[in-house]
Image: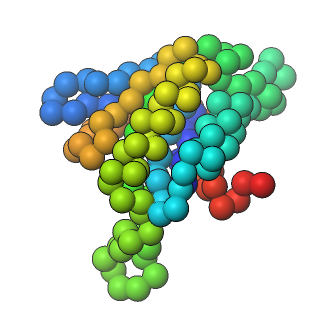
Amino acid sequence: MRFVIQRVTKASVTIEGEVRGKIGKGFLVFIGVGQGDDETIADKMVKKLVNMRIFEDENGKTNLGLKDVDGGLLLISQFTLYADCKKGNRPSFTKAGGPEEANRLYEYMIEKCSAEIPVVERGEFGADMKVELLNDGPFTVILDSDDLA
């Protein structure tokens, strides 16, 4: 499982001309589900996400988390995080999880995040989405389940 986490001052997702999800200060998170991912992996990733301290405190140190700053989450499914570009110029997506399982885990993570963070917005699995953001910093973190203990 892979998350691309961007600290934002605002972010939104538009689908078919309609804004479907919108947050102020918080994290915009692109979520890629890989083959073999399951709830155990999702739980570890969500725990790391909701407790990540990448907001600055009064001393300019990144010591504050989402809960400390009343931040929101905008969660966007993105299977292209599993693009394999080793051969040729056209990416392969064979390492991405199948759509049915990936969608199930995406919904599962939304539910888990909602139990921890008051404002959780979302995209739509498999939809053509237009994502807008104002990256704060910029500050972007890549979280891969293969790197978690």
Let me know if residue 138 appears in the view.
Answer: no
- Quarter of the figure that contains the N terminus: bottom right
Residue 17 lies, in percent from the top left, at: 16, 29
How many labels, in total? Answer: 0
Figure quadrant of residue 147: bottom right
Question: Where is 145 relative to 122, above or below?
Answer: below
Residue 12 lies, in percent from the top left, at: 36, 28
- Residue at left 35%, top 85%? 88
- Quarter of the figure that contains the C terminus: bottom right
Question: Where is 118 relative to 16, above or below?
Answer: above
Residue 113 lies, in percent from the top left, at: 55, 28
Q: Nearer the viewer, residue 7 or 96?
A: 96
- Residue at left 62%, top 49%? 41
Figure quadrant of residue 7: top right
- Residue at left 53%, top 22%? 114
- Residue at left 42%, top 76%? 85
Question: Which residue is the extreme one toward the right?
Answer: 59
